[in-house]
Image: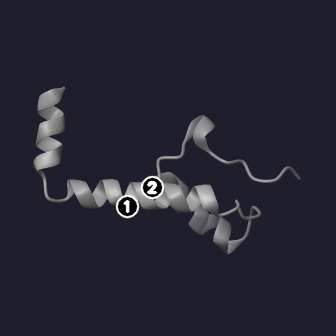
């Protein structure tokens, strides 16, 4: 496992990927979940996926 981590950390793209995931995770934590069916909801869904917010980590938004 340590070899895998060392390999990934040695790659020049690794810092960019982890930074994007952290940024999108922060955005989804701060921005309220948009109403379903809107264009913003579709963009939010993509950002939520890239931020690795899956399963119980997802914000379901306001109850309707």
Q: Dot 2 corresponds to which residue?
A: 50
In the foreground, 62 or 49:
62
- Mark 2: give few (<14), some (14-19) or many (20+) Cα within 10 Å: some
> Which residue is rendered at x = 30% and y = 57% of the image?
17
- Label 1, label 2: how far apart the Cα atoms are: 8 Å
Residue 25 in percent (x, y) is at 50, 54
* Placement of the N terminus among the 4 image quadrants: top left
Residue 20, numbered circle: 1
Q: In the rendered image, which quarter is residue 3 located in? A: top left
Tell me if label 1 and label 2 are in contact, CB under 8 Å. yes
Residue 55 in percent (x, y) is at 58, 37
> Which residue is rendered at x = 59% and y = 40% of the image?
57
> Which residue is rendered at x = 58% and y = 58% of the image?
28
In the foreground, 35 or 10:
10
Q: Is residue 18 above or below residue 4?
A: below
Q: Is residue 39 left or right of residue 14?
A: right
Dot 1: element: helix
> Which residue is rendered at x = 45% and y = 55% of the image?
50
Q: Residue reaching furthest right? A: 64
């Amino acid at each position: 496992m340590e070899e895998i981590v060392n390999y990934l950390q040695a790659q020049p793209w690794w810092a960019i990927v982890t930074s994007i995931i952290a940024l999108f995770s922060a955005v989804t934590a701060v921005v309220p979940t948009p109403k379903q069916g809107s264009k913003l909801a579709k963009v939010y869904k993509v950002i939520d996926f890239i931020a690795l917010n899956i399963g119980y980590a997802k914000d379901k938004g306001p109850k309707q």
